[in-house]
Structures are given as C-alpha cells and as structure tokens.
Amino acid sequence: MRRFKVGDRVVVRDETTLFHTRCQGYMRGRIGTVVEDRPAWVIPEDEAWGRDEDGRHEPFYVVRFKQTELWADYAGPDLDTLESEFSERWLEPAGEGEHSV
Amino acid sequence: MSSETPYTVLMDTLEAIGERDDTDLPSLERVRTPWESRMQATCECLSWRGALDTLERRQAEDLLGETVYRRFPVHTRSALAVAHALMNKGVFTESELRSKMAELRIRFGED
Amino acid sequence: MSTHSHDPHAPVQEPDGTDEFEILELAVRELAIEKGVFSAEDHRRFSEWAESRTPMYGSKLVAKAWLDPAFKERLLADGTEASKEVGVNWLDPTGTGTPSDYTYFYVLENTPQVHNVIVCTLCSCYPRPVLGMSPDWYRTPNYRRRMVRQPRQVLAEFGLFLPADVEIRVHDSNQKSRFMVMPMRPAGTEGWTEEQLAAIVTRDTMIGVALPQPGWTAAEAPPRSGVAHQSAEITGGGK
C-alpha cells in the first residue's frame, strides 16, 4: 500500500550515495509536498542491474519543493518551484517541527 | 574513480578534434555530425544488451569529461567515455582499439 | 539576419577531428560487435528509429491539444497513451522502448501563473520519441546544474524573461518519466489550422526555454539551426 498521499509533506532521506541511485544530492534532507502519485515501478537501484522482471517494485511520487527550500541563496521569487520523482524508500514524513522556508 | 588515467589511444585524438573552447552554454547552433548519431545508437545497444548501462555511461561522461578528458569538446564525451569504460571493463584492450583504428584509417583511405 | 548568423552553406567546423572521431566511433562499434556484445542489426535498428524522431511529433501533440479540448484532457491525463494518436509508441523500437527513454510520458501545461521547464541534472533524460535528439546545450553540465538553481538567469540567457509573478516550475526528470512542456497558445493565432499552429511550436518551446510566437516558425529558420538564436533576437536578449 502507498505510504504517502497527495498533499503530504515529506523529507527526502539523506543516505549515503548508492552506486546506482537516481536521487540527486541537492534534494536530500529537503522538505517538499507530494503533488502526484506515480505507479509502482522497479526502483533504479535494481533496474541498473538488469532486474527488470524480478526487481523491487515501489510506488513513486512527484514531490514539489520551493526553490528557497532547496537553495539558501536562491535569487528568484519565493513562488518558484522544482519538481522531481522519488521512489518511496527515499521519502519520510516531514516531522512536526519541520517547515519549509 | 579519482585514480582514472587517460588512455593514450584516446588522448591521441585531441590534436585532430581541437581543444574545448566552450565555457558557457556551448554552441547553440552546432550541427550534430553523423558519427555522433551513430555513437548514440551504439550507446543504446550497449545498454540494451547489458554491457554498459545508460546511467553508468552518463556518469562516466561527466566524471571523465571533467577530469582526464576535460580538454576535449563536450560533444566528444560519449565516444571517449564509452571507449574508456569498455577498455576498463576488458571488453577490448587498448591495443585492439589502436589496431582497429589503424585498420579503419586504411579502409577509409582506400578508393 | 544579424551578422553573427551562421551561413547554412558554411563548411561544418572541425572536419579533421570529425574524421578521427568517425574512426573512433566505428572502431568501438566494430570491436563491440566482434566481441558479441551486440549485433550490427541492433545498431541499425536503433539508428533508424532515432533518425525517424523529430520535434514534429511534439508540435503536433501541442497543436492538436490547443484545438481539441477532449484530446488535451487525454494528453494531460496519459501522455504515453495519447501519443499513439499522433503515431508515437513509446515502446518502439524494442517493444520496451530504448534504454535511455523510459516509457512514461507526462505533458506539463503552462498557464498564465506557471511556466514549466525541463532539465535532467543526472544525465540528460529527454522525451526523444516526441522531440527527437536533445540539443547539445541540454546535455551540458552547465545547463543541467544551473537550470535547477538559477532558472531565471538561464532562461534569460535564452532570451526568455518572465514576470516575477509567474511561478517557474523546474522539472528535474531524473527518474522514470519523461516530460514535455505544453506552451500556451499565443494571441494572434485565432482561426489557425493544426498545421499552422504546429509550425510555431518549436522544440525549444516544448523544453520550456522559449515561448511560441505567431511570427516565428522552425520551418523558416535554417535547417537544424538558428531557432534558439532567433528567439534571442526577437526578444532582444541573447547570451
């Protein structure tokens, strides 16, 4: 079952870089909002090894970040955003005290 | 990976292609040459058949293109990175590549 | 055209290096084939497929959506499926797509409030089945690194200046999906046919680094060149 729903605030896990992850460094530890569901797909960590058939499937999500949350020195307007997709293992619920800037 | 060293057979192509001169968004109007399209198809084949995954290749292009082959123009990166990676993996050796290139120069020089 | 426009008949630069890289490319390919890594037929199939892709498919999707609200709804709901209506099957040419083009396709609709732009910071993921090969600049580390953190500056380098009350939404397409921007239909195109509309939906407008304009079609520009350059001239910008 899916762990998150559209509207949930999530934080991107800050893990040691796996060899084949597609999760980019600048998003790690940042808080965003789930804006869209994606189907369960084979995660890239397995797909890279050719495990298209037996690889682990996981729900994916589109997460939207405010640019000012991603970059402390963001020079543009507050309303600018960035979106990217994540497999479920990369996301955690954003804690109570955590607020995007 | 920081211990990567350039292959001489690849560095030897630098004189012909010329040093990289694009420091900003490069050459918006560059026309893609036919060999680049064929190289792309080679990349697809290598990934499809499991010899060199697309993501691994792209990471190699970035890493090698910014380090050992940084003097080369950006559009040559896939050719350099693929040749480099396949030699690292032992798919073929540097001397095999050198011989093949010599053979092709003769073949191209004919007729 | 301005003085720094390229003469379409000018010889392609770096001919010597091209020869040498032609040899390198063929040498790598022949060695890989000799070693049994893939076949010459594999290579021919991928080449043929890639050469059949052009931004024309994307342009057609957008123009069709501008004219047909029901199609637009289908396109935004399921880009992969709606692509078939203009003859694009994301599973070509292998039955599972190509290794560098995943088979999930989403169209991002620009609105008066939101301007979308695509980038792939990881490598250079690009919706090739509908836009053809990505431009060189799209694959450069410079574009990939800066578009996610300085989108307004990078767009300005393309000659695109957006008001501060328009949200710029950057899509870092480094996972499963491929994206394409559906620009807004510009004023001055009332009563136009699908073909007329498709002509102004150029590649760059579907990446999100330019906006379609009634007086500017890719067909009027020199083949495979000049599009981004021309947009810079129209808006008075430039890099």
Image (spheres, coloured by chain):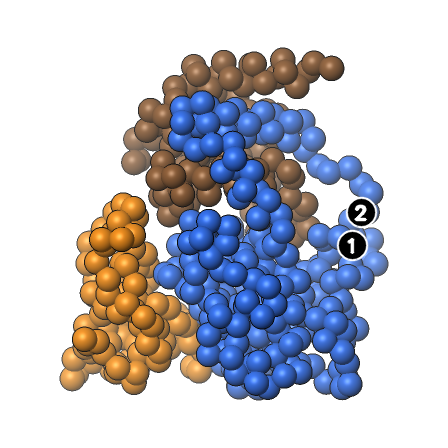
Residue lying at 56% horizontally and 62% vertically, measured from the top left: C88
User: Can residue A25 be seen?
Assistant: no
Element marked by disc 1: loop
Residue name at image x 20 percent, y 65 percent: A89
In percent of width and height, residue C53 lies at: 61, 54
Q: Which mark is residue C8?
A: 2
Decide if residue C173 is on the left or right side of residue C229: left
Question: Can residue B32 be seen?
Answer: yes
The structure residue drawn at horizontal position 42% and vertical position 49%, both measured from the top left corner, is C99
- Residue at 82% across, 57% down: C2
The reply to whether discs 1 and 2 touch (Cβ–Cβ < 8 Å) is yes
Specify the subunit that label 2 lies on: C
Which chain is assigned blue?
A: C
Q: Which chain is rendered orange in the image? A: A
Question: Which of the numbered marks, if any, corresponds to residue C222?
Answer: 1
Picture quadrant of residue C216: bottom right
Spot the brown chain and give its letter.
B
Of mark 1 and mark 2, the one earlier in the sequence is 2
Q: Quadrant of the C terminus of chain C?
A: bottom right
Closer to the camera, A56 or B101? A56
Residue C185, image x and y in percent?
Answer: 66, 81
